[in-house]
Amino acid sequence: MENTLLIGLSRLTTLERQIDVIANNVANVNTNGFKADKSQFQEYLMPVARADNFVGRDRQLSYVLDRATWRDNNQGSIEQTGNPLDVALDGSGYLAVQTAAGERYTRNGSLQINPQGQLVTPDGNLVLGTAGPITFQPGDHDIVISGTGTVSVRQGNTLVDSQRGQIRIVNFAQPQQLQKEGANLMSAPNGVTAQADPKTLLRQGSVERSNVSAVAEMSHLIEVSRTYSEIASILKQQGDMRKSALNQLADVTS
């Protein structure tokens, strides 16, 4: 009976973690550039007591181990917006941005210009270029962002294009090592270095949507929730049986 409770509890713990992961994916189904998280579990076989006077071999107990959470880095669909400041990353790279906590990385290409004329993310983080932040001047118009990230403008009535910098696009040898920080930002742990990524191109006037499939995640959430309820019901029955057994033992007269 104790083994049933312990095995069921290990499964409930992992299911609770899985529900949290799925719920976070569903909450970010409309977040530009968001990458879905997936849960990974592992069977853990634990031997029970072994003694020479047992008839036959003991069976190993099978527990559920929360092994890891990994990120699905597949690209989301690219949606045209017509906004010249929007850029979608076509490839596996990231935009480098400057935050109060240091350099961070994002796939959210819905960009803006702040009151200081600097190119920023929706949260106000500076978009970094190869030579520092991208800064526009008064009178700049007809902004063009090339596939390689070069930002060109026309100023006033001139027909000559002027460059305001080149957006820095980076990538990592092992992108799974990047850590989510919230606000659609990723941080690189110590020892993980960002490298220039010439293969990832920018598509102006578009944004990358979340790669979360709302229908698939909701179906998965319902399935996991039902499994959680079923196992919780079994554990309750086992607890009731134990309680009943203890009450009957207490009623036995000596």
Image: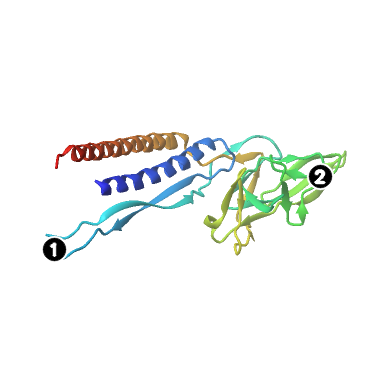
Residue 241 figure quarter: top left
Q: Which residue is mark 1?
A: 53
Q: Is residue 113 above or below residue 149?
A: above
Q: 18 or 145, which is in the foreground? A: 18
Q: Residues within 10 Å of mark 2 (few under 14, many from 20)?
A: many
Q: Residue at x 28, y 39 (%)?
A: 239
Q: Which residue is mark 2?
A: 136
Residue at the outermost left position? 55
Marks 1 and 2 sit apart, C-alpha to C-alpha, by 84 Å
Foreground residue among 138 and 54: 54
Q: Is residue 91 visible?
A: no
**Which picture quadrant has residue 229?**
top left
Residue at x 31%, y 44% (from the top left corner): 8
Residue at screen point 53% across, 36% down = 27
Q: Pick whichever, 39 or 142, lies toward us.
A: 39
Helix, strand or loop at disc 2? Answer: loop
Q: Earlier in the sequence, mark 1 or mark 2?
A: 1
Q: Residue at x 77, y 49 (%)?
A: 134
Residue 177 rendering spot, x and y as whole percentages? 54, 57
| Disc 1 secondary structure class | loop
Above or below residue 229? Residue 153 is below
Residue 208, numbered circle: none
